[in-house]
Amino acid sequence: MKAYDHTRIEKKWQKEWENKGLYKTSDTAKGKDNFYLLTEFPYPSGNLHVGHWYAFAVPDILARKLRMEGKNVLYPIGFDAFGLPAENAAIKHKLDPAKWTRGNIEYMKKQIRSMGASFDWSREVITCDPSYYRWTQWLFLQFFKKGLAYRKETAVNWCPKDKTVLANEQVVDGRCERCDSEVVQKMMLQWNLKITDYADRLIEDLTGLDWPQQIKDSQRNWIGRSEGAEIDFPLRLSPEKKYTYVLLHGFTGTPDAPRFLYWKTELERDGHTVIIPALPNTENPSEDEQVEAALTAHAYDGNTILFGHSLGCAVALKVLEKLQRPIARLVLAGGFVDPKFIDHARNFEKRFRWKFDAAAIKRNVNMIQLIHDPRDYAVSERQLLALESLLGVKALRIDSQEPHFTGEKELPVLRFLRPTITVFTTRADTLFGATYLSLAPEHPFIQSAIRRSPNEGFTKPLISNLEEVKAYVERSAKKTELERQTDQKEKTGVKLAGVMAVNPATGKEIPLFVADYVLGHYGTGAVMGVPAHDERDFAFATKFKVPIAEVVQPVLLRTSGADALREKESSTDRTSVLAVVKHWSEEKYLAVRYLPTDTRGVVSGGVDQGEDPAETGKREIREETGYSKARFVRQLGGTIHCKYWSDVRKTNVFCHFTPLLFQLEDGSMQPIEPHESERHEVRWMSRVEMDAFINREDMRIAWNRAWGGVAYTGEGVLTNSGPYNSLATVDAQKAITAALGLRKTTYKLRDWIVSRQRYWGVPIPIVHCPRCGSVPVSDKDLPVLLPKVKDYLPEGSGKSPLAKAKSFVKVKCPQCKGAAERETDTLDTFVDSSWYFLRYADPKNKKEFAARKKQDNWMPVNLYSGGAEHTTMHLLYSRFWHKALFDLGLVKDPEPYAKRMNRSLILGPDGQKMSKSRGNVIDPDEVVARLGADTVRMYLAFVGPYNEVSSFPWNPDGVVGVRRFIERVWRMASRVSLGTNLNISEVLLNKTIKKVGEDIQALKFNTAISQLMIFLNEIEKTGIDNKQWKIFLKLLAPFASHVAEELWSNSGERKSIHLSTWPKYDESKLRDETILMAIQVNGKTRGEMKVAQSSDKLTQENTAREAVGERLEGKEIIRTIVVPGRLVNFVIKE
RNA sequence: GCCGGAGUGGCGGAAUUGGUAGACGCGCACGACUCAAAAUCGUGUAUCGCAAGGUGUGAGGGUUCGAGUCCCUCCUCCGGCACCA
């Protein structure tokens, strides 16, 4: 027999398989279930590395095994071909990125083919191919039309040297990855996808997915949902202006509707006057009557703020038309002016024929605020547009409490009536402790104060130290991400002069700050500072000398140790003191160790009936330590509650500690009772020693308070909180939110910015028309082809290189046919990869991105294999994308991937990540040439479990081990006997079939291979017959597909082994007739025994008893445990 | 700081999910073949001990007849997030 020549065998069979089209996958196959095995498609970097082998060749094992089991398996491949490296190479070497990419793809395809993997190349998908990106553009336009793609001024990473926007991934430690210059934040108009609309569903739907817990956790964490409340803090502006508000109600409305009363109460509390005229005939309103009533209700002047709701808006506009002098401000909510207005819900038809004089209206007001609720049932988009164009003002779209602003407490409206700062908090329970507000530098209030809009009507600046604030805002805008991080320890900020906010709970005025520890993009960009119960706020308040107000008394539960709470036992209340005792002359403190429970802290003891806590402290100091002259200094804050188990009292104790500070006058002492001195150890300690000594949370809080305290952020009961005192924090949160705020959920997740000022990507198919705005390119004009340009460097202005292609930019508007310009940004490559798996199902379709019927054959993906680096990027983006397609009715499932596995990582031989600079890169081509594709693939499968978050170094010696195995298989082939071999264990054969099959299914390729090795070791001793040999070859085929095929064909088979059927095992032949059992005495193995497989428990026990007889001699057997077929354990008295 | 995951021979890793810890492979040692080497084959290989017998899965404690596996405390490493209110 010839020696094993891997090159010859592998070339031969790869060609053969290709010629026969062995891996062409049909959409359906008779009698076979479809299985979609997906692996992340590669970026055509130009060279295959070991990681690619690991990603593509190893899952191929599963693909092959599933096919042999009778599944119709789709295992496709393609190229994620747009992206930065092509462009960088183009800039560096003056190449065409398209050519560069094409060349790489061709080369890599050759390399991938050398794996002998069962890819169906006829379904290849290449994202930079116009036949693909045509559909990327089309899908983007569907998003646009659904309102899921929008353009917005967004803060981006800007590299001043390369003059381009950078993706977050391109910023390394605050520097540009390419030129190493510092990245700055810059506001730019960017295309966004509304992934935040899907935040909740992206979290909820994780539950039903068969995904590793770790990915689910990461995604949840990334989305960062947190429930809390929005709370309004009214502003007191100076010079303080008091206004008269005239509020006009709508059709069928009355002045005493709850929301009007609520607005009135709130505004009056701020010192304003509120008038709500009752408009006549609300069931059947006429123009003259209503306007007359509104006009006579008040003498309108520059101090008037006029508000209209619904029909009241129209009345308000009519009022303005007729005035002689301007008012301060006009606020309209849910208004309409369109003569065609019809409110079907309330039979309001044909009556509304009012006409407006826009010029007269504008003459009488210099600030108009329009607010619109997108859910409004009475006012349509169309009517809103009419109103907007009449007044020349853009409406602000806000979420009202109830559609059409009809909630009982329309806080969102109130925010427009009076100047207000809204904060988001998850700790509404600490509202009474809010002693200041902090605004992000990006906060609208700060920004508008800086811009000093003349509309505001203030003669003086809103903020009297405006210059200082401006300087601070500018400074923090220049801060790089790097600085923001290193600045974490030291909080900075500037107090706003001339402005105060009102804490809505206490009614007290509190100062405002601008501080960059507040993030502009999270929550409302403003936080309430509660120094007593938040570490950051505490640090800030200490630095800026803001008062600290305790509103939560700690409630501590001891859950571990000797005094851990015992849930089932009763509980009694106790009042005690904690006494921090200072030395009479030195900087030392009394440290007390209570021996029975090893409680280390300060003096403590119970308050007797009617006793003053200070007296208790003195008494306990005397009794526990002997010192008789203690002077009470002060109380250290409010009560500290603690629940624990008392072994002395045999009950749980709910103890209420009053923390106190004492100083000794001198060292005079009295004798200590023996029972006290036995239980207490007393020492003098320095402050540092005490810090290390104290081991109880309650004592530590008391001790810390002697030094100014730290923020207590845990649970407790409320204090200094008016009607909410003594409520638990959880309950207080609900109560205070209901009374003074709005429930609100916020997310860390931000919308997905998809604009890239780059050349090598999908052109965004939008035309900017000066008349029609952003207009989608019509379907028939897709794809918008990437134009050829001379050089690929971005323009200095932050426009992509596409802007240089004049003939590309200049187009006719698809709507009005006038002159317009194309969008010149390209799409993030993550957009390309958000739907590529759908195209595999129908790769050649010219009419649709993928026919629904064809998708249904394969979707959702049965198993998606990929790298851990995509956990929160690609996997989240494509889930969002798929959900949006689902809502558009374009796909049938809300989730694209039923099961996901993150593969491990292959490191260099030195255990480090492979990289050229480290010189530890393994070149797969070289290893394949030397050892063969079968060996490389099988080795990679053997190094360790495939679906774990771990990494394995490439061990050159280890590869040799696998190569040896294959050579031994090769040699074994010549020893296969033609007769029937009686020596080989049937049990081993059946066990092997079972284990190899199950382990492949569980993606534990390493143990499957180990079983094949065990099998080979055995047959080398016993020999094997032809029938059994062929079974073995079948088991080997998914791993070493070429060798197995060669030996299969050598054994006389004509048809490919890969078209053969997976062997079945015989359930009854999985165990030997006689089995080995362990014999234990007191759980320690003392011997082994052979028993018949069929023997019963008693026989096994008796056999065991005999086998270890001498050990049991004269001992009493308390218990005998028999685990049939496994072990017998005798428990004896020693 | 928060959320995950993991710590088992000289190394990569197994362990029927609470039942004889170290499968399989690498490495190493010895032996066979050879003039010799390589390759190949065989034997051994957690550790202490001549042995009987101990001891052993990051450390300590617990539950159990029995713990690598479950519970508590702690340590180390890796991954993700991080001034997120």
Image (cartoon, rainbow, N blue to C red):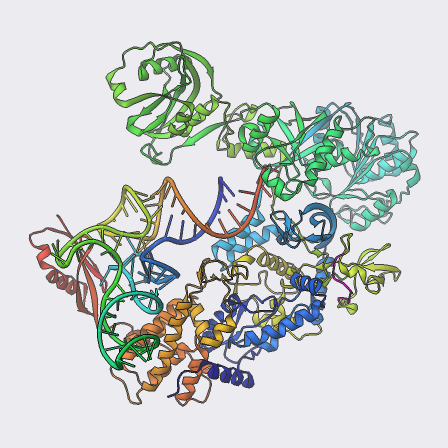
Picture layout, residue A705 above or below residue A184 = above
Q: Measured along the vertical axis of the image, is residue A760 above or below residue A1115?
A: below
Q: Quadrant of the N terminus of chain A?
A: bottom left
Q: Is residue A315 left or right of residue A629?
A: right
Please say whether residue A1005 is visible from this viewpoint: no
Residue at (12% x, 62% y) in the render: A1107
**Residue A48 screen position, x and y as percent:** 55, 69
At 50% from the left and 79% from the top, the residue drawn is A31
Is A1013 a magenta residue?
no
Asked whether the viewer can see residue A657, the reply is yes
Q: Percent x, y for residue A607?
A: 37, 17
Q: Quadrant of residue A296?
A: top right
Residue A793 on the magenta span: yes
Quarter of the image where one finds residue A303 = top right
Name which residue lies at 79% across and 26% down: A243
Disc tally is 0
Percent across and percent down for residue A588 are: 40, 19
Residue furthest to the left in view is A1114
Horizontal side of residue A755 vs A1043, given as left or right = right
- What secondary structure prevails in the magenta region? loop
What residue appears at the point 63 percent right and 62 percent down from the top-left corner? A834
- Front in this rendered view, residue A87 or A553: A87
Compared with residue A793, is residue A663 higher up or lower down, i.e. above or below?
above
Query: Magenta region: which residues?
Result: A786-794
Residue A764 in the image: above or below residue A79: above
Residue A287 image position (x, y, % from top left): 88, 38
